Image (cartoon, coloured by chain):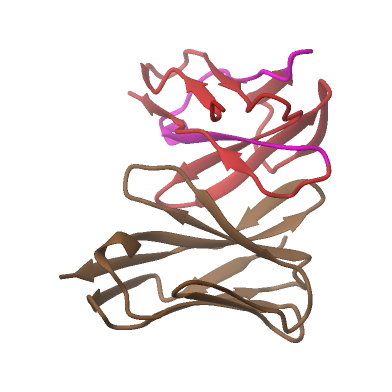
Amino acid sequence: KAGVTQTPRYLIKTRGQQVTLSCSPISGHRSVSWYQQTPGQGLQFLFEYFSETQRNKGNFPGRFSGRQFSNSRSEMNVSTLELGDSALYLCASSLVGETEAFFGQGTRLTVV
Amino acid sequence: GQQVMQIPQYQHVQEGEDFTTYCNSSTTLSNIQWYKQRPGGHPVFLIQLVKSGEVKKQKRLTFQFGEAKKNSSLHITATQTTDVGTYFCADYNTDKLIFGTGTRLQVFP
């Protein structure tokens, strides 16, 4: 069975631009979470979606947003990019009622 | 907010030596999970502990949950080069993971 798929794998953007990252969860998984990983701040929770509804949000500015579609695929958007947004963005999916999170390979975003 | 710290930050060991990473939370942990992230890879779930004082083993790995549910540990016996990576603990709480700071393990052959 296919794992969590994130696209693109790598991205270079300029300050001030916006970016959209995509995540396709494992088939049957309806919960999708997003995390930001940086050397300085470690792994930080961004938000979690279930059945197209955001159930949880981390402590990030409003420039970070997301959504989930009816097929459970999810996107996250970062507007007005800053240099500090350079990070590995990880998506994780899980089954309803299960706590084990399955992570994708991530999207490495570089803001220049 | 909740802070989850891990020590040590780095550990270099000779192959065959043991390794332990400790996870400490500023608040009571709900369910503690452990993940391994290989260099250039993504976190991979290892195990979840739920009960106070719980101990679980996976081959050479032993996981413990503290009696007060404020700390946890991962011990690897006789490390191998395949154990290289960063080990994270994470508190699973209300559908989100609060990750620890991680311990990077390097194993020299």
Residue A71, image x and y in percent? 74, 14
The residue sitting at 54% across, 26% down in the picture is A2
| Image x and y of residue B52, in percent | 78, 80
> What hue represents chain A?
red
Instruction: Indicate the position of residue B60 as horizontal and vertical percent values.
Output: 44, 75
Q: Based on the picture, tell me whether residue A93 belongs to the magenta stretch.
A: yes
Q: Which chain is brown?
A: B
Residue B83, by quadrant, is bottom left
Instruction: State which quarter of the image contains the N terminus of chain A.
Output: top right
Asked whether B106 or A89 is in front, the reply is: B106
Q: Quadrant of the C terminus of chain A?
A: top left
The picture places residue A32, in percent across and down from the top left corner, at: 69, 31
Give the image quarter of residue A105: top left
Q: Nearer the viewer, residue B51 or A53?
A: B51
Q: Which residues are drawn in magenta?
A: A68-96
Q: Is residue B22 visible?
A: no
Instruction: Report which quarter residue B93 is drawn in.
Output: bottom right
Q: Is residue B8 magenta?
A: no
Residue drawn at point x = 38 percent, y = 17 percent:
A13
